[in-house]
Image (cartoon, grey):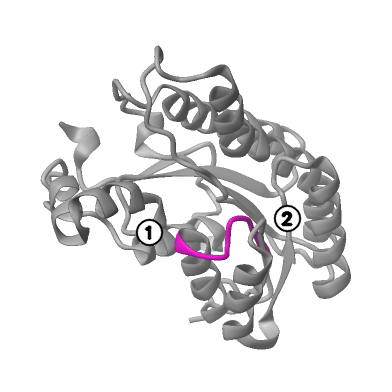
Amino acid sequence: MNRLAGKIALITGAAQGLGAAMAAKFVAEGARVLLTDINVAGAAEQAAKLGDAAASIGHDVTSEADWQAALAFVEERFGGLHILVNNAGISAGTTIEATSFDDWRRVHAIDLDSVFWGCKLALPLMARTVHATGIRGSIVNISSIAGVIAGHNSAAYNSAKAGVRHLTKSVALHCAKQQYRITCNSIHPVFIDTPILDGITSRLGREEGLAKLGRQIPLGAVGEPDDIAWAAVYLASDEAKMVTGHGLYVDGGISAM
């Protein structure tokens, strides 16, 4: 308990799935958290479950203006920002020939450009907060094992998530050079039982869909949202103060194959 005591966090895409799980774990570990999502009602519902330590705001992560508004809100509500989790994202499963340029741009806007905006715009506030409080900061970018291992039918998603992986390293080195006392790391999940898998589970049925995906993973099962939430807690805590520019694979061993 209290691994994140005194820290203030902003988590994007927090209305459901990984974002909601991370928000719950962060609050349980002593942080105050702003949950943001384009799904305003969903983010508000999740925040209400977490009590006074949480708040929510509508947020289109592709919009610079929405980022500015969310950062202004977290500073006004909680007094600053120590932890940024760039989690919002969408999945897209098409080959290079089947991917339209509009779909390519949409996937990159939500999965990669949003991480650029988050890191770029949040860092000044984070640096001020770290300096004022003496509490270390951290950026956690949710990439995917698909950013490391490519698939024939995930051209845009592979590209965007690989971009997140390498952008994370650049941001980490920038923060180190500036002596911000802010780390930056990425998490690379394998299939996790969240709404992002609805396509396959609705087509094959929930049990068969999850089993089919699980057979591709050495440990034999898809992951749970808390598997990623605990990884994020670690990277956002002072336990990971010497970990930066790192990609943490939460992948059931698939990258070892």
Figure disc tally: 2
| Nearest to the observer: residue 224 or residue 185 | 224
Residue drawn at 87 percent across, 59 percent down: 72
Given residues 236 and 44, the one toward you in this image is: 44
Q: Residue at x 27, y 57 (%)?
A: 223
Q: Is residue 253 magenta?
A: no
Return the mark for residue 59.
2
Give the SS element for disc 1.
loop
User: Are the residues flagged by discs 2 and 1 in contact, CB closer than 8 Å?
Assistant: no
Above or below, 46 against 155 in this view is below
The residue located at (12%, 44%) in the rendering is 218
Which one is in front, 117 or 78? 117
Using the rendered image of the protein, determine whether residue 169 is visible from the camera's viewpoint: no
Identified by mark 2, the residue type is His
Q: Dot 2 surroundings within 10 Å: few (below 14), some, or many (20 or more)?
A: many
- Amino acid at dot 1: Thr
Badge 2 element? loop
The answer to whether 198 is drawn above or below residue 169 in the figure is: below
Callout 1 environment at 10 Å: few (<14), some (14 to 19), or many (20+)? some
Query: Residue at label 1?
Result: 194
> What's the distance in space between the residues labelled 2 and 1, CA to CA?
20 Å
**Magenta segment, which residues?**
9-17
In the rendered image, is residue 128 in sight?
A: yes
Q: Residue furthest top?
A: 97
Relative image position of residue 257 (x, y in whole percent): 15, 31
Query: Which image quadrant for residue 149?
Result: top left
Residue 130 in the image: state x and y as whole percent.
77, 58
